[in-house]
Image (cartoon, rainbow, N blue to C red):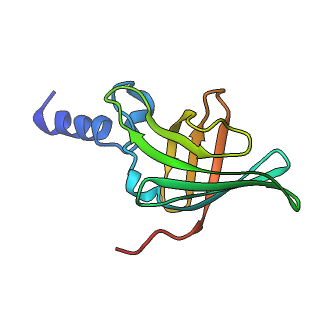
Amino acid sequence: MNRRNALGLLGTCCAHSKAFATDPFVRQDIDTSKLPGTWQSRIGGAVATITFLDSGKFTGRIQKGATVQDEFEGEWSIKNQYIGPTLLLWEFTKSRTIPVGTVDRDELETLNNEFLILWTRRRERRAYRRLVPAKLK
């Protein structure tokens, strides 16, 4: 194989934006600076709204119709792993239904200007849409 073909092949398999889909040691980069903002998802018949602040705090509400099922707040952090998913860690400091001090974790699948897609511990996929746009830099 000549040099030109070898470089073309290398560029095709390694620099392709979907390389993470076929190579278990290459994962999609997640720009966690896009997390702060307000996000909303439908979970069953309820609507979950969560606001992540730059300060590492979050607030949220789960509402079904006019009934607020839970209001919660706490602190969030990101755990990047060399091999494995990027994790979103939640520590609850206030909630009607979740004990204070509970630390939960979700795997970040997608995070961009429009969508936040998480996998819960129960392997449930949750898709959130951004309500409040990210700050312009």
Q: Residue furthest left?
A: 3
Q: Residue furthest bottom?
A: 136
Name above or below for residue 102 compared with residue 60. above
Q: Residue at x 23, y 35 (%)?
A: 10
Left or right: 31 as drawn, with respect to 59: left
Could you say where residue 99 lies in the image, as x and y percent from the top left?
65, 35
Q: Residue at x 31, y 29 (%)?
A: 82
Total marks in image: 0
Looking at the rendered image, the quarter that the C terminus falls into is: bottom left
Say which quarter of the image contains residue 55.
bottom left
Name above or below for residue 43 compared with residue 24. below
In depth, the one of 13 and 120 nearer the eye is: 120
Left or right: 79 as drawn, with respect to 112: left
Could you say where residue 39 lies in the image, as x and y percent from the top left?
61, 59
Could you say where residue 42 lies in the image, as x and y percent from the top left?
75, 51
Q: Residue at x 88, y 59 (%)?
A: 65
Could you say where residue 122 lies in the image, as x and y percent from the top left?
66, 26
Left or right: 105 as drawn, with respect to 81: right
In depth, the one of 111 and 92 nearer the eye is: 92
Q: Residue at x 52, y 40 (%)?
A: 91
In depth, the one of 120 and 96 nearer the eye is: 96
Looking at the rendered image, the quarter that the N terminus falls into is: top left
